[in-house]
Image: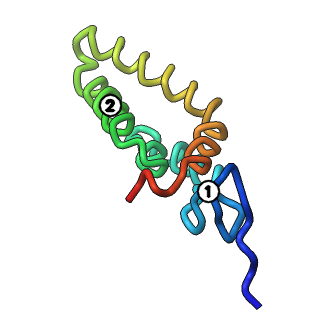
Amino acid sequence: MPAQPQQINGLTGRTGSLRPGRNRDVGTAYLFALLLGGFGAHHFYLGNIGRGIALLLLWWIGWLSLVIVIGGFMLTGAVIWYIVDMCTLPSQVRAKNATPADLYR
């Protein structure tokens, strides 16, 4: 017998999630952030393409322009952003999983 759909915040889903089958995992997001943080992989994983591109550009242009003073400022900004991301990653994943799937069609 198939599972009965559950009512959640006015939406129905078989798994109790607003995005059945497409939920993101906090552990995977942290893995992407730790291994590929300079590439913004955790933002791409969560579907935040603009943030991923911004972090990617800030990080790598900062490294490339480190010989001049502006590179240090860019890297400092990228590191602060990365630290904030590491502290807020669970809430970012929860927000992504709470978004209705209809917005991504």
Q: Quadrant of residue 17?
A: bottom right
Query: Which sits in the foreground, 13 or 80?
Result: 13
* Viewer-nearest residue: 54 or 21: 21
Q: Residue furthest bottom?
A: 1
Residue 31: percent from the left, percent from the top? 58, 51
In the displayed structure, does residue 96 sit left or right of residue 64? right
Q: Residue at x 49, y 48 (%)?
A: 46
Q: Can you give x and y, in whole percent of width and height, for residue 101 in the image?
A: 50, 57
Which element type, helix, strand or loop, lies under badge 2? helix
Q: Residue at x 28, y 19 (%)?
A: 66
Horizontally, is 10 left or right of 31 in the view? Answer: right
Q: Inspect the image, locate mark 2, and give the three-letter code of the amino acid beneath it.
A: Ala
Left or right of residue 73, residue 15 in this image: right
| Residue hosting label 1 | 18
Position of the N terminus, as image quadrant, is bottom right
**CB under 8 Å between discs 2 and 1:** no
Where is residue 38, by image quadrant?
top left
The x and y percentages for residue 80 are 51, 20
Q: Name the residue under label 2.
A: 54
